Amino acid sequence: MGVNVNEKVFEKFGKEFMEGDVVFYENESGNTMYIIYEGEVKITKKARDLETTLAILKKGDFFGEMSLIDNSPRSATATINKDGTKLIVVDKEIFENQICSNPKIIMQILKKMSKRIRDTDKQIENLLLKDLLSKIVGTLKLILKNEEKSENGFYVFDLIKLQKDISSRLGIPLEKVMEVLKRLDKSKIAKIKEGKFLISNEKELDKYMSYLELREKFSGV
């Protein structure tokens, strides 16, 4: 569930960013949250020298609300993932006023936070899988869950961006991710065409993941 905002709200509270701009860094203090009016934001977390992508947020998504709720430092880094991304900037006073005047916002935030926890649990589950193929396919399924089909009925990804996203989420080499994406293309589960990665039927990906799970379960039989 996202948040809908109109153009007048953006004109009053909005700000435009370019790809690569950092909205805030992990462990910074924070007194604002953000709603994506247009574009994409990547949320990452660093452990020692390894940076992991937690989520790619899109139009209607919001982030940064935790620092407003508990006054703690930022739990992750937010980076603009697409040129021309537009964000609505909400400070603590506006946030608290909106909660008091519109209690439904609390439920929206709780639902969004619950979804993020479930997605994080699934991401941890993928990391615990033994074979690399299952890890990558499982992560692709998770990414697909948060996407919408285009008008022609395909889920469409920029091939290089998808490759980097999966690599960052799992902490594995780019070339290993590309090997699996090409394998999915060869098996007709997906299609690589003109720098794009396309999936028309997510159920085929589900079947393939089930096959991988069964293969691992009965590998020693």
Image (cartoon, rainbow, N blue to C red):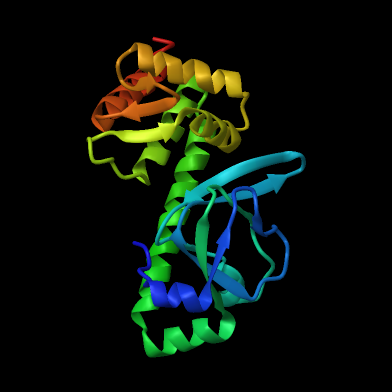
Query: Relative to residue 107, is residue 125 drawn left or right?
Result: right
Query: Relative to residue 191, is residue 64 drawn left or right?
Result: right
Query: Relative to residue 7, is residue 49 drawn left or right?
Result: right
Percent coordinates x, y for residue 221 in the rendering: 39, 9
| Above/below status of 67 relative to 101 | above
| Above/below status of 86 relative to 174 | below
Observer able to see residue 131 = no
Observer able to see residue 45 = yes
**Quarter residue 176 falls in:** top right
| Above/below status of 28 relative to 96 | above
Q: Which residue is drawn at 22% across and 35% down?
A: 152
**Quarter residue 168 falls in:** top right
Q: Which residue is drawn at 31% across and 29% down?
A: 199
Q: Residue at x 43, y 84 (%)?
A: 99
| Above/below status of 63 relative to 46 | below
Percent coordinates x, y for residue 17 in the rendering: 58, 58
Percent coordinates x, y for residue 170 in the rendering: 57, 33
Percent coordinates x, y for residue 77 in the rendering: 65, 55
Q: Which of 12 and 134 is in front in this view?
A: 12
> Which quarter shows the N terminus?
bottom left
Q: Which residue is drawn at 41% across and 40% down?
A: 142
Which residue, as the protein is rendered here, is positioned at the far right? 48
Q: How many marks?
A: 0
